[in-house]
Image (cartoon, helix red, strand yellow):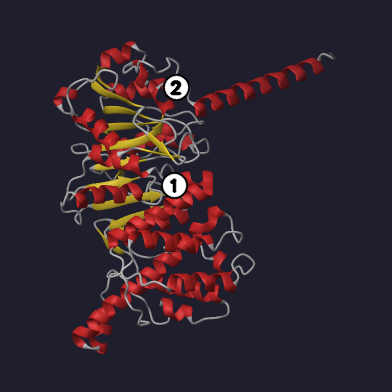
Amino acid sequence: MSDNQHITTLTLEELKTFLWGAAVRLRGQIDAAGYKEYIFPLLFFKRISDVYDEQFNAFVQEGGEEYAREQAQDLAIRIPDGAHWNDVRQVTENVGRRLVEAFIAIEQANPAVESDGRRIGGLEGIFGPKDGWTNKAKMPDHIITSLIEDFSKHNLSLAACPADEMGQAYEYLVGKFADDAGNTAQEFYTNRTVVTLMAEILNPRPNESIYDPTCGSGGMLIKCLTYLKDKGEEWQGVHVFGQEINGLTSSIARMNLYLNGIEDFSIVCADTLAHPAFLDGSRLRQFDIVLANPPYSIKQWDRDAFAHDKWGRNFLGTPPQGRADYAFIQHILASMNPETGRCAVLLPHGILFRKEEREIRKNLIEKDLIEAVIGLGPNLFYNAPMEACVLVCRSRKPQELKNRIIFINAVKEVTRKNAESYLEPAHIEKIVNAYTNKLDDINFKKLVSVTEIADNDYDLSIQKYVFLKDQETLHIDTEDAVSDWEQVRDAYSKEMTQLIKLLSEYGA
């Protein structure tokens, strides 16, 4: 099945340049937000075809053609006859339809494995939506053929492109698409330097289970495994779980995991609040580590169902309709192992002080699950100048942290360069050291008693406890300010409508 390409090792920079160059071909043909729908499936298709050839040819060298065909049946990813990259490359008409046929054949030939009450791996639906490929007005044959020829210029086998390098290139592409697509990026991308911080705080260990209930492109899950890899520790025994509501994004996550050399994972496409995917009988399945960047303050969710949640996730109270943040927080807390569980959740600052969530916040504080509240600097999120916080919780806090919470004000620990904000390694090290160090650090870190927090009416605003000298006393969350204005506007409109109706009834 090989096209006898000469295998030339690609540097990471060469790979990045080539991948982005292929994506640029779509400019003017489709919106930037749609790039990922086409580039990621092609990248994955080319990668698995080249890796298949590499493995098949090794079997041929070992025992001949017939032996190779027998051994190929047991490969991690199988390519059926007629569904290889080279088969599609030979087609000159109705290329999109032929591509879709290959995608479907590969998906069907690689079902998930049932084990331990979960579906592991598998390629069902991994190539995402397929209608766009057969829409010739959107993707004519010559555009698809050009893309295929771009990818055909390079061998993407493991020898030419090791898993770590491919994973880095894939993450680069995710970031580039986020930059190019603007606001659509938030559904599948979290600033990777923030993810690194969260992994450092959670300190994953070999053989633990890791779960992301809103996993996007899978970057948080991958970072936890990379954390172990980089330390030279065993990572292949880690069980990875993720759930994502967006079908295409969940497919991107699965491709991302495969391209990073991770095969033992379970990613499910479904609404986490309405249909949690990982269950243990009548309860939620529980994990050692949960990390997430849930969608901020969503308004369209089934609050009534959550109020009577059959999995008991509303144990702190039912959040207001306009803000589902504490619904996700409670889902995460309920998903933590009662002995080893810990979580790091990226959230808007509003969850720390909003009055409408005061009782839920009070209940959370009194259960003594919060270990740390870490305030981050602005502009760490695509097309959003807002500041955010990392909420760190633990099922069993160490004795010295019982009824106390670590507050870290890291608002200044951020670098902005070329219109991009990020945490440098020194920033991450400073925050992690403050988190692990028992001592207070004036103007940066303070250990605060629950009694003091109760005296502040259960307000977790970081600047109430760790105040920077040149920091303004008033914290304004843009998202919350707009939301409050919308509520006042709607109330005013309702009152005016009633007043006009009343006046008309009296003939005024």
* Image quadrant containing the N terminus: bottom left
Task: Name the kind of residue labelled 1 in the image.
Answer: Asp
Would residue 56 appear left or right of 256 to someone viewing this image?
Answer: left
Residue 22, disc: none
Task: State which quadrant residue 507 falls in.
Answer: top right
| Rendered residue at 21%/20% (across/down) | 440
| Rendered residue at 52%/49% (across/down) | 181
Q: Residue furthest top?
A: 455
Residues at marks 2 and 1 touching, judged by CB atoms closer than 8 Å: no
| Residue at mark 2 to residue at mark 1: CA–CA distance | 25 Å
Would residue 507 appear left or right of 474 to someone viewing this image?
Answer: right
How many marks on residues?
A: 2
| Rendered residue at 54%/56% (across/down) | 34
Residue 206 against residue 134 in the figure, above or below: above
Would residue 504 appear left or right of 143 to someone viewing this image?
Answer: right
Position in image of residue 491 (x %, y %): 63, 21
Residue 100 against residue 361 in the figure, above or below: below
Residue 354, disc: 2
* Image quadrant containing the C terminus: top right
Position in image of residue 117 (x %, y %): 27, 56
Residue 271, disc: 1
| Rendered residue at 76%/20% (across/down) | 501
Whether residue 265 is visible: yes
Q: Nearer the viewer, residue 265 or 433?
A: 433
Whether residue 394 is visible: no
Task: Name the kind of residue labelled 2 in the image.
Answer: Arg
Task: State which quadrant residue 466 falls in.
Answer: top left
Q: Secondary structure at mark 1?
A: loop
Q: Secondary structure at mark 2?
A: loop
Crowding at dot 2, Cα within 10 Å, few <14 / some 14-19 / many 20+, comes out as some
Q: Nearer the viewer, mark 2 or mark 1?
A: 2
